[in-house]
Image (cartoon, rainbow, N blue to C red):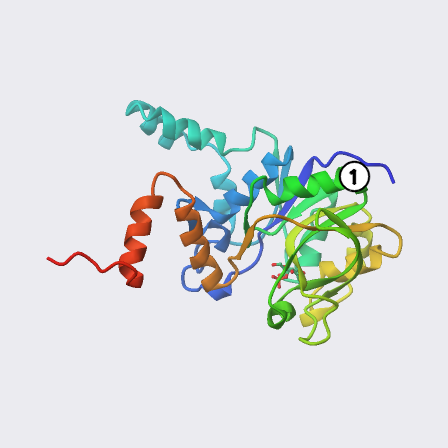
Amino acid sequence: MKNTKVRTAVFPVAGLGTRFLPATKAMPKEMLPVVDRPLIQYAVDEAREAGIEHFVFVTGRNKAVIEDHFDRQFELEAHLAERNKSAELDALRADLPKPGQSSFTRQQEPLGLGNAVWCARDIVGNAPFALLLPDMLILARPGALTQMIKAYEQNAGNVVAVEQVDPAEVSAYGVVGRGAGDNSGFAITEMVEKPPVGSAPSNLIISGRYILQPEIFDLLGQHTRGAGGEIQLTDAMQKLMESQKFTGVEFVGRTFDCGSKVGFLTANVAYALDRPDIAEDFMAELQKLTGAIPAKSG
Ligand code: G1P
């Protein structure tokens, strides 16, 4: 198989975010901040670090603010410039994809992740692409997608990031079977979406990062329903395994499943402690809260 460079990344951001209501009633869940950056920004940063040049967002109704977030805001820029806040201004500009580097399309019905990915088919075209689920926030250096690109350069085909979880948690995720190879690239033998506890092929879950060949779109276009009555990406990948190679990467890093409240809150703590500008003060507050150090009296 030809090993074409991965230039495009797809970000499915159409979900309703019902687990975070009422916060997500009028605001997309992908705009929830971890410290001071929205979740979606971390995914875009990770993709850019990995060499991605085109960013495709599959949105839905009430998601227009994501498009605004990745556009210039002249009033704000003028305000910062007037006050000589050049560091803030430069940081804002650095976060943006360059003109023409982003595309937006809509998933019209909530038919599942597989259907959201399929909605990007015309924009992606006949080329391999990265897929990042912004809910799964991964703190890693180098970034998880960068680690996967390395595996892709060595193995070609398709690459899926995986990690070990407690066996009791597997049924919330897609799970892979592990074949020959090491953590930086092993053969995936099977994939199953949300297996019942006890019947999963391993405790290696799919971590929401993929490098996929465009043939996946034909399979997703069959609109076959799977777990939960939804069109599942994992089912299409399992089918594509009949004709193409899938490599698993057990990346080095820590994932926070920001689709859950506890995961999201833990991410905020971890990312705050990872920030040199606030880590020390924040740690002091945490210690007071948790009783590790008694709060100063008076
Ligand atoms: C999706 C995928 C699943 C993957 C998970 C990671 O599930 O279908 O294979 O493990 O993302 O977050 P969802 O979270 O949409 O239920």
Q: Residue 104: horizontal and vertical position, in percent?
A: 61, 43
**Which residue corresponds to mark 1?**
154
Visible in this render: residue 77? no
**In the image: residue 65, left or right of residue 250:** left
What's the residue at 40%, 47% (across, down)?
273
The answer to whether the beta carbon of the residue marked 1 is less than 8 Å from any atom of ligand 1 is no
Q: Quadrant of residue 295?
A: bottom left
From the viewer's perspective, is 272 left or right of 193?
Answer: left
The residue closer to the viewer here, 107 or 157, is 157
Q: Position of residue 287 (x, y in %)?
A: 30, 57
Front-lying residue, 118 or 164: 164
Percent of width and height locating residue 186: 77, 51
Note whether residue 257 is visible: yes
What is the number of callouts on the image?
1
Residue shown at the point (50%, 51%) measured from the top left = 30
Q: Is residue 176 above or below residue 184?
A: below
For the N terminus, the quadrant is top right
Picture quadrant of ligand 1: bottom right
255 relative to 157, above or below: below
User: Given the image, on which type of amino acid does mark 1 rest?
Assistant: Gln
Q: Position of residue 248 (x, y in %)?
A: 74, 52
**112 or 269, which is in the foreground?**
269
Which quadrant is home to the C terminus? bottom left
Work out whether residue 217 or residue 144 is closer to the camera in this orientation and state it. Answer: 144
Which residue ends up furthest to the left in the rendered image?
298
Mark 1 is surrounded, within 10 Å at the Cα level, by few (under 14), some (14 to 19) or many (20 or more) other residues, namely few
Q: Identify which residue is drawn at 43% across, 31% down.
A: 91
Residue displayed at 61% across by 32% down: 101
Going by the image, does 62 lie left or right of 115? Answer: left
